[in-house]
Amino acid sequence: MPSCELEVCDIEDAVKKDDLTPNDRITKRDAVLPKARARSAKNGCIESPVGDSIIPGTQKIYIKTWGCSHNNSDGEYMAGQLAAYGYKITDDSEAADLWLLNSCTVKNPSEDNFRNAIKRAQELDKHLVVAGCVPQGQPKHQSIKGISVIGVQQIDRVVEVVEETLKGHTVRLLGQKKISGKKAGGAPLDLPKIRKNPLIEIIAINTGCLNQCTYCKTKHARGDLGSYPPEEIVARARQAFEEGVVELWLTSEDTGAYGRDIGVTLPELLWQLVEVIPYGGMLRIGMTNPPYILEHLEEMAKILSHPRVYSFLHVPVQSASDNVLADMKREYSVDDFMHVVDFLKERVPGVTIATDIICGFPTETWEDFQETVALVERYKFPSLFINQFYPRPGTPAARMKRLPTEEVKRRTREVSKVFHGYHPYDHKVGEQQTVLITEDSKDGAHFVGHNKFYDQVLIHKSEGDLMGKMVQVEITSAGEHFQMARVLHETEARSPGLVEPLPKGAVSGVRTENTLVKVDQGQPSLWNDWKKVALFILLAAVLIDVLRLGYLWILE
């Protein structure tokens, strides 16, 4: 039996290697023998562990996810597998039999919210499973002692963990998936999932990264780079579009590093993906760090200019001081970052570059900070994520002497003031744009869409049923972070979807009558064009052959 450094070994050590997977498991598995624990009932009595008579479908599962799009994708996959196996996914936390809490470790607030949710679940005497980066990075933390854990690369085993937890057992799955001895991207991409938004598919193309940033806790959880093969990613994308998805998000801890562990590059993957995106559908490329995109700038400029790819890229700079970047171990200089931005702005007119800033890193001087402010003033990033430095436990930066809290807040306020002082969309008022609508606004009165540059465009719902459609609009006004628009009704709103999208809450991968309803996209696909050409050539060849035979018959 393999060794296990954790206090509680992974459940796979107690399950035979030839056991059926969650996808094809229809009968009871061989016995799993995790340690049972007594649970205290509200009335003070000791509740005995529930027996093996647990029947999936009679329990309700509440799932809460914090953090990035990668985490959200993991949450969708876990919900899909549980629903496909018979559990009912509910938004009513108090009515649920079990809570599945999918955590984020990037910032203290999100981790605090996660731990507060654990306490609340325990107060309500709920069965509990925790997932995500917090338990993966800190498996021995006191707050998750005695709680079932599902690791970030083990989400395909969530059904087993939930089933055993409902029986009163505590189980932990924290192992790493490997293929031929090398770290894999994670659980298979063809698992069932429930999309939070039926119009948007999120695909994690790799997990982990190649960096060792001194402030980052995510590295402890996601580890080193592990990429999915291009064919697996493309197959998942094709399936998503066949289920009515109109927008594809690629996510990971660093998309630019994709494929370096398996001998492929990000542009090679992107060109394959573009081929399966339907006319009018759009692709959004996730965050990439400067070091790994520098060598692909020429190809990336071509890809970002493609009509089915948003001209948008998220490239975190974190600081405009080379000294601070060195202390962060970011492995690039400010000049490298500026070269990426300047190159893309020149080759992709109108491109949107989003970036991140960390205010108050322990070694950041006032002069360092002013360099960062100057960078923001120079580029006027329309999308800027401003973060106060948080010392994450176990990271090198947590051992550095911190700046006074009030000074960190002062710097955060100053750069925020600069950000809110410019209006990046004022010059677009009066423009006519093509917008893909995929969401509702928080106020419920508007549709939310995005133009080619991934600018947020709001359209009042009185304009008609526009969800999931691509429309022509005129920008009527602009705010700091959005544009308001009216629909040009002389143009036709069309759906890019190959079929009607799945109903909200439906499990992806399960064929229903709904998934077979085709949608008129308003423009024939390239494949249809080729079929017409081929048919014309065939008919011409037949006609020529008939004329030739007639000519020979006349000669005879």
Image: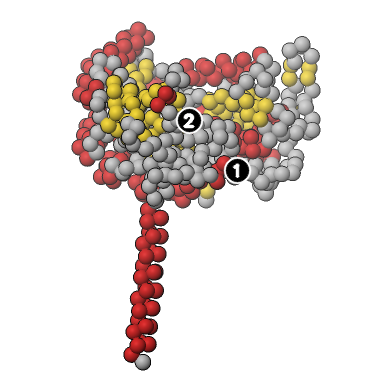
Left/right of residue 176 with respect to residue 107 in the rendered view: right
Residue 318: image location, x then y, percent? 32, 25
Asked which quadrant contains residue 395, the reply is top left
Residue 408 seen: yes
Label 2 CA crowd tier, 10 Å (few <14, some 14–19, many 20+): some
Seen at 30% across and 40% down, the residue is 304
Judge left or right: residue 324 versus residue 441: left
Instruction: Determine whether, in the image, residue 174 is placed left or right of residue 46.
Output: left
Location of residue 104 in the rendering, given as x and y in whole percent from the top left corner: 49, 25
Q: Which one is closest to the eye, mark 2 or mark 1?
A: 1
Which residue appears at 69% of the width and 39% of the height?
Answer: 14
| Amino acid type shown at disc 1 | Thr
| Lower position in the chain sequence, tag 2 or tag 1 | 2
Q: Can residue 214 be seen here?
A: no
In the rendering, which numbered label is found on residue 471? none
299 to 454, vertically: above or below: below
Please name the amino acid that badge 2 sits on: His
Residue 425 rendering spot, x and y as whole percentages: 26, 24
- Residue where numbered disc 1 is placed: 512
For the residue pair 555 and 327, the one nearer the viewer reads as 555
Out of 61 and 328, give the one closest to the viewer.
Answer: 61
- Residue picked out by circle 2: 220
Q: CA distance from mark 2 to mark 1?
A: 41 Å
Provide residue 399's location: percent of width, then percent of height.
41, 19
**Residue 108 position (above or below residue 77):** above
- Could you say which quadrant of the image residue 319 lies in? top left
Could you say whether the residue bearing mark 1 is in a helix, strand or loop?
A: loop
